[in-house]
Image: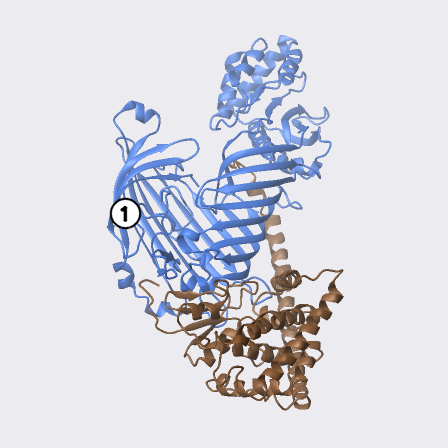
Amino acid sequence: MEGDQETTGFTLVTRKPNFDLPTACPNCLPAYIYLKLAQLPFELAFNSTFPDSDELPYFENGTYVAYNNEDGGVIEKLKKDGIINLDSPLQSLPDYLALKALIVSWLEEALTYELWVGTEGISAPKIYYSDLPWAIGKVLFYKQTYMARNRLGITKENAEQREKQIYKRATEAYEALSSRLGEQKFLFEERPSSLDAFFLSHILFTIQVLPETSVLRCKLMEHSNLVRYAEKLKSEFLEASSSSPSPPLHSFPSSFSRKSSKPKSKPKTEKTEEEKKFKKRARFFLAAQFLAVVIYLSVMGGGSSNELEYEDEDY
Amino acid sequence: RGLHRRLWTSSGRHKLNSSICLKTRHRTLSCFLSVPMANPTENLDANQPIREPEDEVEEVEELNGDEEEEEEVEDDEDTVSKSQTRDGRSSVDSTKVESLFRRMRESPVPVRVHDVIVKGNEKTKDHIIEAEVDAVREATTLQEILVASRVANSNLQALDIFDSVNITLDSGPPELPGTTNVIVEVVESKSPLTGQIGAYTRAGARSSSVEASLKYKNIFGYGDIWDGSVVYGCDNSAEVGMGMYLPRFRGLPSPFSSRLFLSTQDWLKFSSYKEQSLGLSLGLLSSKYHELVYTVAWRNLIDPSRTASESIRRQLGHSLLSALKYTFKYDQRDSYVRPTSGYAFTSSSQIGGLAPDSRSLRFLKQEIDLRYAVPFGFCNAALNFGVAGGVTFPWGSRYQNRRSSVPERFFLGGNSSPVCSLDGPSALWGFKTRGLGPNEAKRKGDDERDFVGGDAAVTAFADLSFDFPVRWLRERGIHGHVFACAGNMAKLSENEFRNFTAPKFLETFRTSVGAGIVLPTSLFRMELNYCHIMKKQEHDRAKSGFFVTFSAAS
């Protein structure tokens, strides 16, 4: 487009929504929630072709861009650049840093492990590769699984030991956070912070995206106050602007398991329909190819002699 | 083979010799009609004692008239000495040959080809060689046979797998008068592995490149050539590839080529993205006028500099390209480097998204290029006109809203001359590479702008070339030219076509005029121009002044 683009609006670019979440990617969700907690009006845009990029999510306002792989993440960059800072009065508190370390390292590790290794990446295709061709999606899946294992330091020798360590840490973190939170609305006093964004994102992802059989999910569900906390914040901040109501989190395990079983059967029927469509198209494509080859052979096989004479081609 | 035009190589391993020799029924008198590789005078000297040199010279010149010199070759001494032993026979035969030549000059001599015999091929399959000699089989007169033999000879050399090719016309079986046997003797290359380093031009790229390749020839005997190559292009591109070339695929006359490549193109300075591709391209049809290529590639656009503008940012990521490209090329100009008469037309159509998966890149692209050269009588002057246009559009559901893919869009500008390139709208004098058209501000902190390309582009130029009155310059082909050009681009995707109006498009046309000196060299055509930008838009990267363009003739 010629000329400058003067947009005064804020835009957050994330990966696509799924599993009833505004964005299904565990790296993008904290930024989304942070902006919602800050009650900053913004638009949501999606990039569905770059699953292995660490630039996403990024926040833009005109020509200003805050990438996730700069300055410690989008949220940190927004704080630093003065766009929005929910943590300024809280940073001096003694347990701010401790809680941050707990959430950002132990819980994040546990989530990464559970998504790529613990559940063998069963949810990953829907989060990352729904808009990419099958072959590319498969290769990127293997690539991202390998990178996740590397990042977590998992090798053949220490796999079991590392798994135990990760789950143990996650359990301890949940207990600590559960007792710290109690029945409070936010982690700190009555004001939201970036830690709420990270923690809420973790809980929502673990409950809604990871399958029922997930070990991490079961461990989280044992702490009902954490789930209530997530439910409250979700209905207040995330659904206030969105038109479609999402299912209640607190009426679990029974209703949640029902809810998750329903979507499971729905995706299955959708899948088979998609598969059928794909197979039909593939058959048409093969038929067209065959026809083209037959026509080519019949046309070119006959009229070839004209080409041979005086063919002083330069090459 | 239409993909390459070799400008210079230093392989040093090629020794090519070829000849056609004619034997009469009674004696094996040979008359050597050498094809241009060899030095014609050497051959004539060897044959002089046997027959009248005049006839021979005439024959040689008649048939060799319009062929160009290619690389340097050495004469194979064996064939020359063979002639000397055979030709030292009776003078009766020489008079017979004389009368035969006289008959040939007067009227067509009816002769029928009885059989084609192939010798010397240990690895190469017979049908590969016989297929090139088919036209000889169908000839009905001696003149036709000789001409067809020459064509067959050059076709066999073009296969690039033989060290020497000899086509001999022997007398047919005695019980069948008026027949001849065609004997094809080939000597296969002893060392099938050759290495080459050269400067090339490729039809698809806009600039020249340096290529180093290793070729393994004729492994399976089908004339197959396998090569591995590394190409470094002058436009910051690099490619590693492996290719396979078959002159004939299962009896079809068209060669088949395939290439597996891994390439990267750096456009960070101009459009803030880098393109990486891993793919396979198949040359399905390649003839004088037509070319059909299918490409499937995994393409990734990244921005390691993190300065891209908004629309480039949205395009970053992976995509699958599965596209079929058909090119029709008709070039009747008298020269690529300095056309003075004739016309040329190219049409290239591309359709992407040929895969059952709807998530592959879907687009349609059409380019047209038309050239016309009008000669004037004086000073070897000629007026060249050219018009080129192209349009690209996505297809599929909600195609009007979709955005087109940046690498498929058109970009105008660069330091190559529009006179030479015959592949759609690309160059404009005076404008830098990717220097005009729709553009956007880069990320804050960077004052540069990203040129994101247009979905439709039109260029036109007029170029008057003339010789200088100085003879020294004329001998070297250095001439002058005066030119004018105009071009414009527009965005059509994402519903922008609704805002497109012809008056606005014409109003925003960029134009430039200038004059300069053209220095044609064996590798490329260099121009030293002074260009004055008459009309440009805000943010265009163009400046009036002196600049140099390099272009390889396409």
Closest to the observer, B246 or B372? B246
Label 1, residues with CA under 10 Å away: few <14, some 14-19, many ≥20? some
Q: Which residue is mark 1?
A: B543
Expressed as whole percent of the image width and height from the top left, the position of residue A17 reads 54, 76
Does any portion of residue B42 appear in the rendered image? yes
Colour that chain B carries in the picture: blue
Closest to the observer, B40 or B480? B480
Expressed as whole percent of the image width and height from the top left, the position of residue B125 reads 71, 37
**Residue closest to the far front:** A94
Closest to the observer, B523 or B18? B523
Identify the residue at horizontal 27%, vertical 47% (top origin): B543
Q: Is residue B554 above or below residue A209?
A: above
Expressed as whole percent of the image width and height from the top left, the position of residue B337 reads 39, 36
Colour that chain A carries in the picture: brown
- The C terminus of chain B - image quarter: top left
Closest to the observer, A116 or B143? A116
Q: Is residue A229 above or below residue B304?
A: below
Q: Subunit of mark 1?
A: B
Identify the residue at horizontal 49%, vertical 46% (top origin): B237
Does any portion of residue A210 appear in the rendered image? no
Which image quadrant for residue A109? bottom right
Q: Decide if residue A87 is on the left or right side of residue A298.
A: left
Q: Is residue B353 above or below residue B181?
A: below
Q: Amino acid at mark 1?
A: Lys
Which image quadrant for residue B336? top left
Expressed as whole percent of the image width and height from the top left, the position of residue A128 reads 58, 69
Q: At numbered mark 1, what does the secondary structure look like: helix, strand or loop?
A: loop
- The N terminus of chain B - image quarter: top right
Q: Decide if residue B346 is on the left or right side of residue A247.
A: left
